Amino acid sequence: MGKVTTLHWGVYTRNQEAVAQAIARKEYMDMTPTGVEVVDELLALMDQAGIMHRLAVEGEYQRRMVPMLLQIVTYSSKIILGLSSQHQIPPHLFRDAGLLRRIGYTAKQIEEGFYKRGKGEHHPLHKNTLAAALERLTVEESQAIFAGAVEDLVKARLFDDTVFSLDGTELSVTEHYPGAGRVTSTRAVKDKWGNVKTSTSTRYGYLLLSLRGVKSNTVVAAGIDNIGACEHAWVPVLVQKAKSAGVKIKTLLADGAYCVGDMLWQLKHKENIDFIVPADNSMCITEDARSLAQMKEGVTTQKDPQITAMGIKNLTTYEAYTPRRP
């Protein structure tokens, strides 16, 4: 008889609360064997596409004990791992020595850290230092990183979108933020006795506008304005930014805030971009389109299991659809 081989099986366990909660929710797709794996794949892709070298910026800060490039890559790793809070960084990111070595930390930096700040030991650096990393970038540096990354993605052919959506999102802040916009609204409020009173409220914040591919969900252009600003004025700006990076836009989807005649005219006749925007019920073109649809004149129809779309040919009653008047 040959030699008998005995197999000894062991189980590796990690007492991680986030994993336990994910298992309880049956969200197994959210779990990965190690942080190194998911970060390594994306960092390798960024390096291959040429994005990594764009992160080598100087920034504006006096203490340079931690290289700016290392801070940005570490912060990027936080986003890749899906850590929503800075408090999750020490237990989930800084305790993964393999991940830190892949990012670029040396064994000495992992063990001893760059410095000691506050109570106890903070290896390799304090979470608040990492939180402030992006604030040290100049506006020109941050814009160059974003625009350059879009160019690299286009050159690498990592997305092939031709249909894009444009939308604005409010970023709420307090009145103490510098340069924040403000919007004051008044509404009628009824108390428990049925009395109607007028309530006035003011909100502060900024407006984030983004142009993203419908298929890949890749943001190809973005801008920041004060809350309450006219969103449609950003359409040609974002479109031209995306085009300058090599993005090909054939169709643009937008909500009612962008239904402005001269802007839509510019999209079609200057940028050669088709658009899909909702028409308001108070607009004459809406009433005309519905009437022609009922009469079955010049109508094309497409269906899928959920939606029936009807198109009206040669509908020209949108009087605002003209070039901007001087």
Image (cartoon, grey):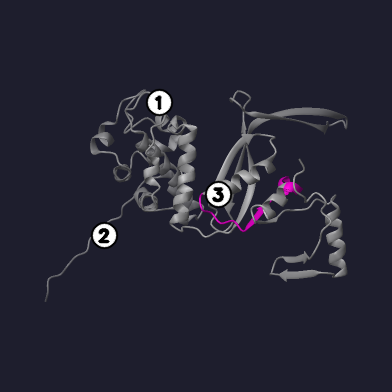
Q: Measured along the vertical axis of the image, is residue 56 above or below residue 240?
A: above
Quadrant showing the N terminus:
bottom left
Residue at point 34% right, 50% down? 13
Q: Amino acid at mark 2?
A: Trp
> Which circle's residue, 1 or 2, is located before the other in the chain?
2
Q: Measured along the vertical axis of the image, is residue 144 above or below residue 38?
A: above
How far apart in space, not on screen, are marks 1 and 2 (Cα)?
52 Å
Q: Nearer the viewer, mark 1 or mark 3?
A: 3
Range covered by the magenta-colored residues? 245-262
Q: Position of residue 162 (x, y in %)?
A: 58, 59
Q: Amino acid at mark 1?
A: Tyr
The residue that disc 2 covers is 9
The residue that disc 3 covers is 242
Depth check: give the residue in front, 307 or 7.
Answer: 307
Q: Secondary structure beneath disc 2?
A: loop
Q: Is residue 85 in view?
A: no
